[in-house]
Image (cartoon, rainbow, N blue to C red):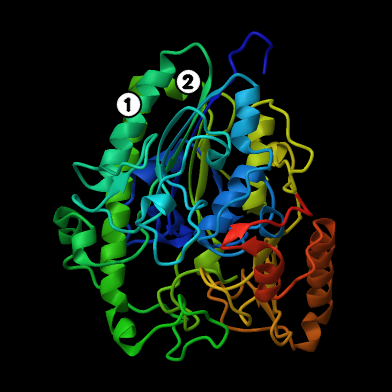
Amino acid sequence: MKNNEKRPNLIYVFADQLRYFSTGYAGDTKAQTSHIDAFCKESTDLCQTVSGHPVCAPYRASLLTGKYTTSTGMVINEIRMNTNHETFADVLNENGYDTAYIGKWHMYAAELGNHYDPKNSYIPQGRDRLGFDGYFAGYNFRHEYEVGTAYYHLDSPEKIYYDKYEPDAQVDMAIEQLHNLSEEENPFALFLSIGTPHDPWVPENVPKEYLDRFKDTKFELPPNYLDENDPYADNWARLSEEERSELTEWMRVYYAMVANLDDNIGRLMQSIKEMGLDENSIIVFTSDHGELFGAHGRRAKNIFYEEAIRVPFLIQWKGHLAADAQRDFVFNTVDIMPSLLSLMQLPIPKKVEGTDYSKCIEGEEDTKDGALMMCTGPTAAWGDGTEWRGYRTKKYTYAVYKKDGKELLFDDQKDPYQMHNLAEQAEYKDVLTDLKEAMWKKMDGINDTFEHNSYYKENWVKDRIIVHTATI
């Protein structure tokens, strides 16, 4: 970047529970994602992006710190994030950027099951916003999107209810803020965290016009569907018989939500172009994690299978990054902050644990490095038995459970549905050993000792607020 060029703006848009495989550009013929597909044509597609801890709160904590869960402390959902990290927004503020955040936050609640109470849903001004000191229209989390139930907070505990379907309203708010920010002299960064297509997948949770688009679409169970629940699944991942009977109807609502999301991405991109902001803005579209819909005997996320970890990541920067290009290096959640800061020629905090892959994004370099992935416990409660670590490369996925040491190895190129565990096959012994060593090397580098979930409960938190600071 030349010295006389204005630093680029950053517009970072991420959905909740949108998996890579449910987009048209990735090959899903049922998906109605024409706007996202068009954005892909104008962007660099990081097609091997993975969610390093595929759960809402851990993802967001890693996104905004560039650190793994074992350093952020967000070992389950619904504990309160430590505020003494140097965050993405801190770096932006220190370098003259205006910041804005709209949507789901999911790093402030401290009481399981009481997330509608403003003491959990309102994120107060100050360090609990992790450096987002500008416009902040957020809420901790909930999963109802229709008029009359969906709300957000500004700078008080008062709930402000949307006057339309939540994603529609949020994109309206984002467009308004982009207008405001673009009139200022400073460069800006706007983060838009959209709640869909997260469940519950019930008809009233999506506008009827979108559900009608799929009324004649036939949805089928995935090829790797299992009748029995995965024995390592937590309560959020297990399926009752009634839920199993509803899976294909859940998919119908899910795809309807994705279609609405797509229309909103189209509206947002059109407004960005009309304002001329596409000329000098890094624009990202991605997701926090995916969804299994019965694959491997599971629903939801929090697992190393492709349906959960593989997410879209499209990045556009006109005149700097190639359009309609694909990069297939493995890109992990912790790598997002350092890579984007590097592209923006901003300093990367010393304690960031991710890798700067900006040269790989630009196509000047490639890497064979893999991604360390982890689960540190059940999705939103305490309990031992579900913890795992994994390592994902361009070709293989390796994983091991803490509970009993069970290992899994998949050739993702030959076996994309991960139906054949190669861990005990002699001809793959060297592959497994190499992946395991690479995984432990990354773990050792961040002082991850692969603890049971109960360790964190006993040593890290008090009343679901993180108190441990040794690795921060």
Residue identified by numbered label 1? 176
> What residue do we see at 68% from left, 66% from top?
395
Pick whichever, 357 or 106, lies toward us.
106
The amino acid pointed to by label 2 is Glu
From this view, report whether residue 239 is shown above or below residue 49: below
Q: Position of residue 145 (x, y in %)?
A: 27, 53
Distance between mark 2 and mark 1 Cα atoms:
18 Å
Residue identified by numbered label 2? 279
Q: Which mark is residue 346?
A: none
For the question of whether residue 361 can be seen, the reply is: no
The amino acid pointed to by label 1 is Glu
Name the secondary structure under disc 1.
helix
> What residue do we see at 52% from left, 79% from top?
234
Pick whichever, 386 or 196, lies toward us.
386
Q: Disc 2 or 1, which lies upstream in sequence?
A: 1
Mark 2 closeness class: few <14, some 14–19, many ≥20 residues within 10 Å: some
Q: Position of residue 268 (x, y in %)?
A: 34, 34
In the image, taking residue 184 as reference, residue 246 lies left or right, namely left
